[in-house]
Image: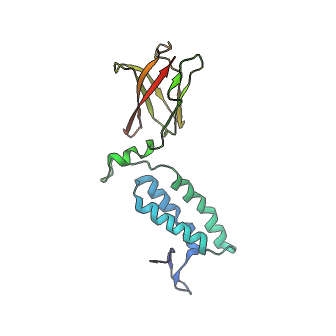
Amino acid sequence: QPGSRAFYYESTRKGPAPDLNLLIVPLYGWLWHRTGDMKFLYKGDELFAGGVEGARLGGKQFSQNYRWSFDYVKWRSVAPVPDPKAGNYSKERALLPLKNLSVFPNPAKLSESLKITFDRLVAGCTVTIFNSSDAQVRELLSGKKDYVEWDGKDEKKKPVPAGSYTYTVTTSEGAEKTGKLEIRK
C-alpha cells in the first residue's frame, strides 16, 4: 500500500498489514541479488523497516515474520550476481561482485613467507598475475573460497623478483577487474 511501508491485506480488517512484510520481503532480497536492480533493494529496505516497526510480536505473526526476515538480510547483504543473458546487463552491474575486492599487503616485502591475499572474491574467480613485460607469471583459482593467496612464486614455484606486477581478477560470468602490485626487497 503506497506510503504505508506495508502490503495491503484484505480480510476482516482492510488496509496495510505490516505483519506480513517480513514473510514476503525475502523475495525482494533475492531479486536484488539476482538482478542488481536497485528498485528491489530500495523497496525491500522500506518493507523490511515497515515490518520491523509495525509487526505484532506475538502468535503466528512472530513466527512468520522473524523466521523469514533473516533470509532478507542474507540476500540483501551480498553483492548481486548479474546474469549476462538478461536484457539490461551492463558493465557496471557485471563488476558489482568485484566491487569490494581487497588485495593486501600491497606493496609486499619479498620474503620466504610472502603471501599476498586477494580477498572478498566470489566463488569461481581466476586471478592472473603478469610481470612488467605483460608475461603471465601465475594463475590462481578461488574455487569455492572467497579469497586466494599468492605466495610470490611463478608457475615453476620459483620466487619472482622484486618489481611491479599487474593482476586481473575474472569472475565465472566474465567480469574483470585489473590492478597493480608492488613487490619490494
Whether residue 91 can be seen here? yes
Query: By what rule are the colours in the image chosen?
Result: rainbow
Q: Position of residue 168 (x, y in %)?
A: 40, 31
What is the x, y in percent for residue 127? Answer: 44, 30
Q: Residue at x 56, y 72 (%)?
A: 20
Above-or-below relation of 87 to 40 = above
Residue drawn at x 51%, y 50% as measured from the top left: 78
Q: Quarter of the image holding residue 48?
A: bottom right
Percent across and percent down for residue 178 are 39, 33
Indicate whether 48 appears above or below 149.
Answer: below
Tell which residue pokes out farthest to the left in this image: 87
Q: Picture quarter containing residue 69? A: bottom right
Residue at x 47% of width, y 49% of height: 79
In this rendered view, identify the residue nearer to me: 111 or 167. 111
Of residues 16 and 131, the one drawn nearer to the viewer in this rendering: 131
Residue 101 on image: x %, y %: 48, 39
Is residue 38 found left or right of 72 in the rendered image?
left
Rendered residue at 49%/64% (across/down)? 44
Would you say 79 lies left or right of 177 here? right
Q: Is residue 131 above or below residue 100?
A: above
